[in-house]
Image (cartoon, coloured by chain):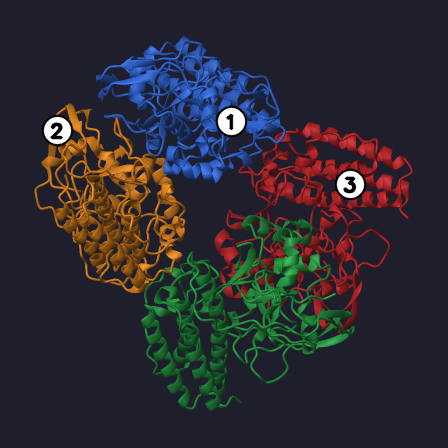
Chain colours: A green, B orange, C red, D blue
Amino acid sequence: MIDTEYLREKFLQCRKQSEFICKDLEIEDYSVQPVVDVSPPKWHLAHTTWFFEQFILVAFDKNYKVYNDDFAFLFNSYYNNAGDRVLRPNRGLMTRPTVKEVYAYRNYVTEKTLAFLSTDVTEEIKEIIEIGINHEEQHQELLAYDIKYILGHQPTFPNIPLDYSLQEETQDFKFLSVEEGVYEIGHVSNDFCFDNELGVHKTYIQPFSIANKLVTNREFIEFIEDSGYRNFNLWHAAGWDWVQQNNINAPLYWHFFQNKWHYYHTNGFTEIDLELPVMNISYYEAFAFAEWKKMRLPTEFEWEVASEKFNWGQLWEWTASAYLPYPNFKKADGALGEYNGKFMVNLHVLRGASMATPKNHSRKTYRNFFHPELRWMFSGIRLVK
Amino acid sequence: MIDTEYLREKFLQCRKQSEFICKDLEIEDYSVQPVVDVSPPKWHLAHTTWFFEQFILVAFDKNYKVYNDDFAFLFNSYYNNAGDRVLRPNRGLMTRPTVKEVYAYRNYVTEKTLAFLSTDVTEEIKEIIEIGINHEEQHQELLAYDIKYILGHQPTFPNIPLDYSLQEETQDFKFLSVEEGVYEIGHVSNDFCFDNELGVHKTYIQPFSIANKLVTNREFIEFIEDSGYRNFNLWHAAGWDWVQQNNINAPLYWHFFQNKWHYYHTNGFTEIDLELPVMNISYYEAFAFAEWKKMRLPTEFEWEVASEKFNWGQLWEWTASAYLPYPNFKKADGALGEYNGKFMVNLHVLRGASMATPKNHSRKTYRNFFHPELRWMFSGIRLVK
Amino acid sequence: MIDTEYLREKFLQCRKQSEFICKDLEIEDYSVQPVVDVSPPKWHLAHTTWFFEQFILVAFDKNYKVYNDDFAFLFNSYYNNAGDRVLRPNRGLMTRPTVKEVYAYRNYVTEKTLAFLSTDVTEEIKEIIEIGINHEEQHQELLAYDIKYILGHQPTFPNIPLDYSLQEETQDFKFLSVEEGVYEIGHVSNDFCFDNELGVHKTYIQPFSIANKLVTNREFIEFIEDSGYRNFNLWHAAGWDWVQQNNINAPLYWHFFQNKWHYYHTNGFTEIDLELPVMNISYYEAFAFAEWKKMRLPTEFEWEVASEKFNWGQLWEWTASAYLPYPNFKKADGALGEYNGKFMVNLHVLRGASMATPKNHSRKTYRNFFHPELRWMFSGIRLVK
Amino acid sequence: MIDTEYLREKFLQCRKQSEFICKDLEIEDYSVQPVVDVSPPKWHLAHTTWFFEQFILVAFDKNYKVYNDDFAFLFNSYYNNAGDRVLRPNRGLMTRPTVKEVYAYRNYVTEKTLAFLSTDVTEEIKEIIEIGINHEEQHQELLAYDIKYILGHQPTFPNIPLDYSLQEETQDFKFLSVEEGVYEIGHVSNDFCFDNELGVHKTYIQPFSIANKLVTNREFIEFIEDSGYRNFNLWHAAGWDWVQQNNINAPLYWHFFQNKWHYYHTNGFTEIDLELPVMNISYYEAFAFAEWKKMRLPTEFEWEVASEKFNWGQLWEWTASAYLPYPNFKKADGALGEYNGKFMVNLHVLRGASMATPKNHSRKTYRNFFHPELRWMFSGIRLVK
């Protein structure tokens, strides 16, 4: 049973937060799509709104009047069951609706959803609203990535106030041992989780030791200086192709000038802080780094089992696990069945959370997933031996 | 001798006109680049400004302080001699500087140029200012094309007030004969012209007859209905590939719905007006249409010789001539030498002017040029037999 | 301890078998590379020879004289540690050495290896020869795939005698149950295996039932006729893109004509035999078919555990498992360390063997792996529920 | 009136010559297509045969039995009117028919054509046979280019006996003057010519001086050493892109090793002979070289008018002229109308002939044409000032 008042609060807070993240953008920053994986902030604001409109108001509120018939086509992301849509690479070409209109659309749908929630809605509807909130929270994190990418790829490297910052992990470095045995994996409580976390099941884990801290910039610079990016023996074949074809020689946003490594954050360039965790790295880089250390990355099961022993939550942590369904995975009926299941091929799992993950949105069973060459998300490395 | 007062007036009028063309745009419309040939309006506004800054103020005004050191990199178009620059396909990714900053940049450079013009500037400087004005006028026409393209490729087909409109050519259709003989080609007066028009020279012309009117939409629909787009015998091999690969079956901006052909202008969709000249067609289409009529397009020399006999100026007219240097063509020294000469391969000449060509910017010797597959410019067809 | 006489026999038999597979080819068939994944038969014959030359003769036989200094460059596949090489997509452009020269090269290396084996070689050398034999056996299977692809993509669909044929699985269909529990996975005996099978380890398996037969053409045609290739809900997002972009509507080599489905084998077209197992399907298709059946594919662990209960060996069977290292996976030192490990990302595991797998080359722990969109290998489907 | 006996002799000689050109090839060399512009020698041998079969035997000989129904599909080049065909980039994938079968096909069609010629054929048929001979002669020259390309792009650089060799032009260098005036252009005699040479017409030519010799390797090395390939001011914008994207720094087949420039001919590598004409250069390179010399290339009309004053015939000479129709150009009816006309866009004209041009196939009015970036043909440079 979801408490309606609690849900209303959470919904409102969530709707405000997305706009808060964009508060320092210029209108021009809202519409651009520098690479296919990065969506325009305007698109995120509208798409998360369309999600409530489509799956709550259109689906259940008989009195609802669609804000604009074109928007379903413009702001559907990947739900084939919800009709045709603008192809992903063309999101950055939409100059209309304007940012102002998108905010008006947001207000309209927010109000209508609140009004609808005041009627005596069913538990099913409340559950879908909760999914909508969690969906928008996921996009809040993507907004953080995408804004950094958009600004960080301007020739002028503009800066805006910084909303997130990494902290040094000050504890002494050590490896934590986990014993061999059968462990239970998956989400158990009644709290919200995504379908891909469900289906508690046993897994056999070999004995392993896992680092209590993330890999730091200091260590990563050692890897660079030891020719890590030029030693093919450290890389997957596909990773080595990626390095060669894209001339990769450092994490994303790293720039070498004035004889030093700097990185770009949305508040501009800083000299690298050696004690902070390294971030914005791909799975290929995480793997090569682990090879170089003669260690490895944890599987997602090892991570879940060991996670209570260390601090996590600053950066998503690449695991050695491909993103595959749990035994007894069941996808939801209808369009929401497309939420997770259809991506379960060619991707790798990240566990944990990042400084851009909305409060209360993280849990140890959360399965994040990305293509192995991507690195604009806030990703880091934890080692196992 | 260029009169300074006259030049000041022309300069100011030109600077205002570029901004007038953009008056109905939303900020979002200024930054997008839907295909590589279409530049963001913001870019045009800044690039034409950079042209005056670079070739007048930086070059000649010792007291000039550059507005922003980054802008040369951002807003140089293709002048290798003027340094590195943002690659053309990336113009649409620049969200910064903002539209507001670009207008401030425009004002700054306009004022500095006017102030500099008030000092006793040389004839050479006045000549380069005149080039700068003509350059900006060319971009005014490109702005018209690009704005139409940007709005016409929104899924929502927005509309703004229309600044240009085609007129029906009401004269009776006839062919005008030109006698065989030696004719002189090229610009002769002291008025401004581009380097590619210079070098008056003789050419031998065979007898020909040329239409006194442009081809109309009515005629073009006949071509479509007679399977013109599906009959490979009418097309160049390269044109046929272009038709097949892009599924071309009508001029750009034509849409068939409600059982009729419509076209998009910036003021929205209209049913096709059969009596207006057909526009937004490629060289390949113009050629195929002429083949279908068992006629041909004029050469640029035929056009120039015959042009006094008919009305022109509504649409640029595709000619059968490749864009090549005139005998004795001399390109200018320095970066301005890159203005025209280096494009003299793989392009076709259009003659005349269009409704979007700035007043006083057209003349019968003007050589416009585009790739044969392009059709977002305001182009039409005049036949010869 | 590997018996030298036994090894000599196996080596000789293996060398002959590769040539036997090519016996019906025309010289022209040996050199072509229709897609990047398919290598020219000539290349396979030379590459497997180079493997023995490089890793045995050059490495250990002090008296060995390299046959041709160019060949290491031409016939290295992907061993970065063994030097530069012809890029994979260019294998089909090599007209020289000729087929005749490649056979001479084969004879030379076969004789030199036999002579070297007659000297008192170490156990390590015998082990590498055994790897070389297994390596060549893998290429024998690829030869079967590639020859079928090359001939099956000729506009003329030539035919040659057929060396392999599928058998109907005549047993009654049933599901075989496996109990929940901890099972051991991985290669245990002293027989040859690849490094990726080593590291016996425990895994926890949930209860499941697995089919005793492969999916048949009859069932697959039902899937097609029920619009399986047009129902996006059955497919991975990546699989659906693959279907759309390549207009996939049937397994590879299937052609619909004379109102019936036919398939191409190297001996020409045949009407589909409904009772034979369906083959030449991608992981995406196997997955979609299982979705349509409301079942799933086995994991590679489930397969290995259950494999003694059913007949296998006609077709490689797609599993639900991504190709990842076993716990404690150790790659070999030097160039042979590149054999398997560096491919452990983005691929899916197939288990079993096919009719083209060399005798004695199959075992239940064998981990074959391919990209999920590939289907020119002899692959089939076994279902789990 | 074409003399039948003469035609028979010419036909037979032509058929033999194509095979003579291929006499030193290995079977493997016949089938490969390293880039889209280079066709497999086997394809040339079959396509020229298909041309006689299609346009003579099938068209006129009622008793003719088609050799193989598939061959029209396989060996049609670009005649849309003659039906569907294998796409050009796939010519190199055809392993069947074999080389041996193609020779059998040649013999069959040669014999049938000779037999048909012995019947009392019409003048029209004899004219088409003459076109067929000229067509095959054009392919003989392409065979020379393609064989050099195929062998010259083997990693092993094989060699075969050389059938063509350039001669030093020993006359003293001078410029030959041509007076201003009206000249006649185009083919006049009754001898064979292609449709694109017809339509004698007047052209006005400004006074010019043209070199009596081709540019030599010595001069071209000076251009290279003066950074000609790195000075963007010398190049067309499209040419500069081509240089950058392909890392061009010398003519095709030039290799710098042992501290010297060498070039590859089909008989292997030789040190550059400084006194020979430079060959295998693109239009872009010819243009840039002329810019560097502060001269220019001749137009095709200048070339034709001046050609009697100098020796030509070693290399095709790039002209400044785009390939466009002459006034009154008429393409033939039916499929042969596709021979020339449909290529009249985006190409540049070369005049003269090369050492690989069949005897009696060259004449001063001959218009050869290629894309400006191509350079595998035997092309050279003659300057005008």
Q: Is residue C88 left or right of residue B118?
A: right
Q: Alpha-carbon neighbours of circle 3 within 10 Å: few (<14), some, or many (≥20)?
A: some
Foreground disc of the pair 2, 3: 3
Spot occupied by residue D227 in the image (x, y as percentages of width and height): 46, 31
Q: Secondary structure at mark 3?
A: helix
Question: Marks 1 and 3: same chain?
Answer: no
User: Which chain is disc 2 placed on?
Assistant: B
Q: Nearer the viewer, residue A245 or C53?
A: A245
**Label pair 2/1, CB-CB below 8 angstroms:** no
Mark number for residue B178? 2
Q: Is residue A340 left or right of residue B262?
A: right
Spot occupied by residue C341 in the image (x, y as percentages of width and height): 71, 54
Mark number for residue C279? none
Spot occupied by residue D188 in the image (x, y as percentages of width and height): 27, 14
Q: Residue at x 65, y 37 (%)?
A: C160
Q: Secondary structure at mark 2?
A: strand
User: Which chain is disc 1 placed on?
Assistant: D
Amino acid type at mark 1: Asp
The residue pinned by badge 1 equals D146
User: Which chain is disc 3 placed on?
Assistant: C
Amino acid type at mark 2: Val
Distance from Cα at disc 2 to Cα at disc 1: 47 Å
Q: Quadrant of the C terminus of chain C?
A: bottom right
Q: Is residue B332 left or right of residue A170?
A: left
Q: Residue at x 63, y 52 (%)?
A: A229
